[in-house]
Image (cartoon, rainbow, N blue to C red):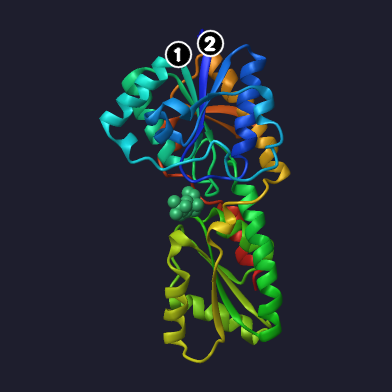
């Protein structure tokens, strides 16, 4: 079913992710290519509720020079007000007053939960572009920002390896990933980390200690354990290990934190953002709604928001197996 939409809004929401700017650019330019007006909504759902100056019509030159920039020039927010009926009503009134008939939301879990509820309540078509460094959505092999964040983590872990090997040290490095271990697993394989601690796989302190001990006996000059934040606190795990085997390791902890969220997006993320931006606009025109656009095996796929956010995205068992084999 073709939707006769003339004006759309685009906004970024939740945790920012590298590639969001490239996605905004793609939505604006493809919207204009298809003769739509495109309004940028600043500060996500917060801005939608506030209205006024938070709504700005964007032209092709307004999104020049941003494809290579991290963060989001539209800025982002985690909106509490949008969780209330009152907030959503205000947001809808502002959209209506501006003649906005469809939305592209660039974000992750929380953003799509809000979009689903809002779309159901007010019947407004909304298409989502998956953007979260956590890669924890169903319906796209990769989410925007995941590749960049992982590469940022890899660079940091490589640097830590240099100093760890010089001092025969054990490092616990905490990477982001609130509920999932995607960044942890991929960065661990790419840096040859000794093991990972992720929410998807239990590991006891005994087992951890055995893995590290094996490395010690096999002439390793340093050990690195990558901890996904959802798998537990690296500081606590390091403490537990040191209680179990006191004085055995010269242990340090590094938390990479928000360094992983910023920075210039990789080529991969820029292209993904560009493709998904175009597909999102084309989807809206073709009557898609209440769904996220993603790429599965490089093919475009629309997945209902509810399925995209259900949290069942599984870690790649094949990569876990590879990791296990190679870290001896
Ligand atoms: O969802 C992306 C993410 O970076 C998670 O990995 C992390 O747990 C969370 O956002 C941090 O959110 P905030 O920046 O609001 O502290």
User: In which quadrant of the rendered image does the C terminus lie?
Assistant: bottom right
Position above or below: 125 against 311: above
Position above or below: 100 against 85: above
Q: Residue at x 50, y 38 (%)?
A: 107
Q: Position of residue 187 (x, y in %)?
A: 63, 60
Q: Are marks 2 and 1 in contact (CB under 8 Å)?
A: yes
For mark 2, does the 10 Å Cα neighbourhood hold few (<14), some (14 to 19), or many (20 or more) residues? Answer: some
Left or right of residue 176: residue 124: left
Q: Residue at x 63, y 69 (%)?
A: 193
The front one of 256 and 192 is 256
Position above or below: 165 against 4: below
The front one of 290 and 257 is 257
- Number of marks drawn: 2
Q: Position of residue 264 (x, y in %)?
A: 68, 48
Earlier in the chain: of badge 2 and badge 1, it is 2
Left or right of residue 170: residue 85: left
Query: In which quarter of the view is residue 164 placed?
Result: bottom right
Query: In which quarter of the view is residue 297 placed?
Result: top right
For mark 1, does the 10 Å Cα neighbourhood hold few (<14), some (14 to 19), or many (20 or more) residues? Answer: some
Query: Which element type, helix, strand or loop, lies under badge 2?
Result: loop
Q: Position of residue 202 (x, y in %)?
A: 43, 65
Q: Residue at x 53, y 25 (%)?
A: 56
Residue that numbered label 2 is attached to: 6
How much space separates mark 2 and mark 1, taking CA atoms?
9 Å
Label at residue 99: 1
Q: Residue at x 70, y 31 (%)?
A: 64
Query: Which element type, helix, strand or loop, lies under badge 1?
Result: loop
Q: Would residue 178 be visible to someone looking at this image?
A: no
Position above or below: 99 against 57: above
Q: Would residue 185 be visible to someone looking at this image?
A: yes
- Whether the residue carrying mark 2 lies under 8 Å from ligand 1 is answered with no
């Amino acid at each position: 079913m073709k939707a006769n939409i003339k004006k759309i809004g685009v906004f970024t929401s939740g945790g920012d992710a590298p590639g969001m700017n490239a996605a905004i650019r793609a939505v604006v330019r493809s919207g204009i290519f298809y003769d739509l007006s495109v309004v940028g909504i600043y500060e996500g759902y917060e801005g939608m509720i506030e209205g006024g100056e938070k709504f700005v019509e964007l032209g092709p030159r307004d999104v020049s020079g941003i494809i290579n920039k991290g963060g989001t020039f539209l800025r982002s927010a985690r909106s509490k007000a949008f969780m209330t009926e009152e907030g959503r009503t205000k947001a809808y009134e502002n959209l209506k007053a501006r003649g906005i008939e469809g939305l592209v939301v660039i974000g992750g879990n929380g953003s799509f939960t809000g979009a689903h509820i809002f779309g159901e309540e007010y019947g407004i078509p909304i298409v989502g572009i998956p953007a979260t460094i956590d890669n924890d959505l169903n319906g796209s092999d990769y989410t925007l920002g995941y590749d960049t964040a992982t590469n940022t983590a890899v660079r940091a872990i490589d640097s830590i390896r240099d100093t760890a090997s010089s001092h025969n040290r054990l490092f616990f490095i905490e990477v982001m990933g609130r509920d999932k271990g995607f960044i942890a697993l991929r960065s661990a394989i790419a840096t040859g980390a000794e093991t990972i601690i992720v929410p998807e796989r239990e590991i006891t302190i005994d087992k951890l200690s055995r893995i590290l001990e094996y490395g010690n006996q096999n002439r390793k000059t340093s050990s690195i354990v990558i901890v996904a934040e959802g798998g537990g606190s690296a500081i606590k795990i390091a403490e537990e290990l040191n209680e179990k085997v006191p004085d055995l390791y010269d242990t340090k902890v590094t938390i990479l934190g928000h360094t992983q969220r910023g920075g210039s997006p990789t080529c991969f993320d820029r292209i993904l953002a560009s493709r998904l931006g175009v597909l999102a606009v084309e989807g809206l025109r073709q009557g898609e709604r209440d769904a996220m656009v993603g790429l599965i095996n490089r093919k475009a796929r629309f997945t209902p928001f509810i399925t995209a956010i259900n949290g069942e995205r599984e870690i790649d068992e094949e990569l876990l197996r590879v990791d296990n084999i190679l870290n001896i």
